[in-house]
Image (tube, rainbow, N blue to C red):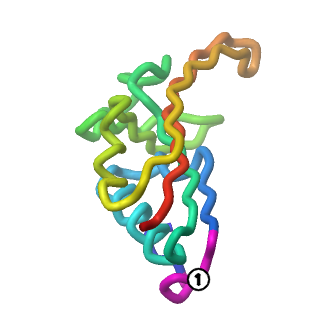
């Protein structure tokens, strides 16, 4: 995601769901910039981020700036957590068409968990 092998202005729509937050925030920024680079003018980007309202926030190995290495099905995975307005800065050069803050409670392998997300649909100017 940090280095998309596509030409500039290739796509009218880029979709990233439950993926970009599985890396350090410096790499999240690189990935968002790559998604924006491959978008055509007036193209749409749909992307979501984990928030600090997630029940897993603060657990695991702290690697700084609300980033944690956590075990997921016996595999270490990086999760970057964001304050609800923090990702807005990634889209200052775009039009935010939709922003939704969601907190979901669900069962995962017999355990009740809470997931916090902020979802965006943004348009390239």
The residue nearer to you, when weighing 42 against 13, is 42
Q: Badge 1, how many Cα within 10 Å: few under 14, some, many 20+?
A: some
Residue 69, by quadrant, is top left
The residue nearer to you, when weighing 26 against 59, is 26
Residue 96: image location, x then y, percent: 44, 48
The residue nearer to you, when weighing 74 against 22, is 22
Does 109 sit left or right of 65 as displayed?
right
Residue 116: image location, x then y, percent: 51, 25
Q: In this view of the protein, can residue 36 be seen by the observer? A: yes
Give the main secondary structure, helix, strand or loop, of the magenta stretch: loop
Residue 40: image location, x then y, percent: 54, 77
The residue nearer to you, when weighing 114 against 35, is 35
According to the image, label 1 marks what residue?
10
45 versus 48 height, above or below: below
Task: For the C terminus, give its image quadrant.
Answer: bottom left
Q: In this view of the protein, can residue 76 be seen by the observer? A: no
Residue 86, by quadrant, is top left
Q: Could you tell me which residue is drawn at 52 percent across and 82 percent down?
A: 9
Q: Is residue 9 magenta?
A: yes
As helix, strand or loop, the secondary structure at mark 1 comes to: loop
6 versus 42 height, above or below: below
Outermost residue, left side:
64
Residue 63: image location, x then y, percent: 28, 40
- Which segment did they paint magenta? 5-12
Number of numbered discs overlaid on the protein picture: 1
Q: Could you tell me which residue is drawn at 63 percent across and 66 percent down?
A: 13
Q: Could you tell me which residue is drawn at 50 percent across and 27 percent down?
A: 101
Q: Is residue 49 magenta?
A: no
């Amino acid at each position: 995601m940090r280095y998309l092998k596509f030409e500039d202005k290739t796509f009218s729509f880029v979709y990233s769901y439950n993926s970009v937050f599985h890396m350090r925030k410096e790499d999240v920024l690189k990935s968002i910039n790559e998604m924006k680079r491959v978008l055509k003018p007036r193209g749409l980007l749909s992307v979501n981020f984990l928030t600090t309202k997630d029940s897993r926030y603060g657990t695991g190995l702290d690697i700084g700036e609300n980033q944690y290495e956590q075990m997921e099905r016996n595999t270490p995975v990086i999760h970057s957590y964001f304050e609800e307005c923090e990702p807005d800065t990634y889209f200052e050069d775009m039009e935010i068409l939709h922003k939704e803050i969601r907190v979901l409670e669900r069962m995962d392998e017999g355990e009740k968990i809470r997931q916090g997300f902020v979802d965006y649909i943004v348009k390239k100017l």
